Amino acid sequence: DTGVSQNPRHKITKRGQNVTFRCDPISEHNRLYWYRQTLGQGPEFLTYFQNEAQLEKSRLLSDRFSAERPKGSFSTLEIQRTEQGDSAMYLCASGRTGTGFDEQFFGPGTRLTVL
Amino acid sequence: AQRVTQPEKLLSVFKGAPVELKCNYSYSGSPELFWYVQYSRQRLQLLLRHISRESIKGFTADLNKGETSFHLKKPFAQEEDSAMYYCALARETASKLTFGTGTRLQVTL
């Protein structure tokens, strides 16, 4: 296990198309987070899971966004009817509760470009 | 609402000079504060957190609750310190992070 992985690393799509990203966390981590980062900004929280339960969603996550973690392992983030404003780097992080401080380990990100 | 402010987008220092990256936060409770770093072509990684009160790669950061600040300091900058630095806040351990906009540190000869 070499850390959090994300696929694809880059995605170019046309406005109005749907896209899906995948995140594979570190295997023993029960928490999984999604963040979005636009140019010149820090990462912004979107949502997180503990095991398969989605515990919190940001107001940034419009109805066009949906995230799942069906078996408490990998997670998918889907964006429907993409808009140019969705262009960003989408970051996934994972962590483990119950060990005091829960460090979040980040993946390399998926860069989305909406034309 | 919680907010993190990093007033400098870019900080340029000479090698061997002291470094201070500023971070101020607003949060009504007792937050957990962190510094994350992103080196060129690498992923975001944790540099240090206030609860451990440790020095990593020569960097330290002290939480000042009176001034709501968590500035990152290093007495002598090295070329390999050049990176993007983000200050982040969490309401409690294992919860979401709120990041600042980041400061790019550039260490020149």
Image (cartoon, coloured by chain):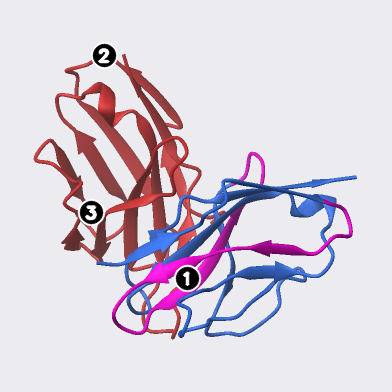
Disc 3 is attached to a residue of which chain?
Answer: A
| Type of amino acid at the residue the image marks with label 1 | Glu
Residue bearing the label numbered 3? A69
State left or right for residue B48 relative to residue A104.
Answer: right
User: Label 3 crowding class (10 Å Cα cut-off): few <14, some 14-19, many 20+?
Assistant: many
Question: The numbered mark 2 sits on a residue in which chain?
Answer: A
Q: Name the residue under label 1.
A: A103
Residue at the far front in the pictured view:
B67
**Discs 3 and 1 share one subunit:** yes
Q: What element carries label 2?
A: loop
Instruction: Give the CA separation, mark 3 to mark 2.
Output: 26 Å
Task: Based on the picture, tell me whether residue B28 belongs to the magenta stretch.
Answer: yes
Q: Which mark is residue A14?
A: 2
Whichever of callouts 3 and 2 sits on the residue coming sooner in the sequence is: 2
**What amino acid is labelled 2 in the image?**
Lys
Q: Residue A93 magenta-drawn?
A: no
Mark 1 is surrounded, within 10 Å at the Cα level, by few (under 14), some (14 to 19) or many (20 or more) other residues, namely some
Image coordinates of residue B93 in percent, x first then y, are: 38, 79
**Magenta part of the chain:** B14-42
Q: Chain letter for mark 1, please.
A: A
Q: Vertically, is B16 above or below A96?
A: above
Q: The red chain is which one?
A: A
Q: What residue type is labelled 3?
A: Arg
Q: Quadrant of residue B95?
A: bottom left
**Direction left: furthest residue:** A63
Tell me if residue B40 comes above or below residue B61 in the rendering: above
- Chain B's colour is blue
Q: Where B23 falls versus B31 (above or below)?
A: above
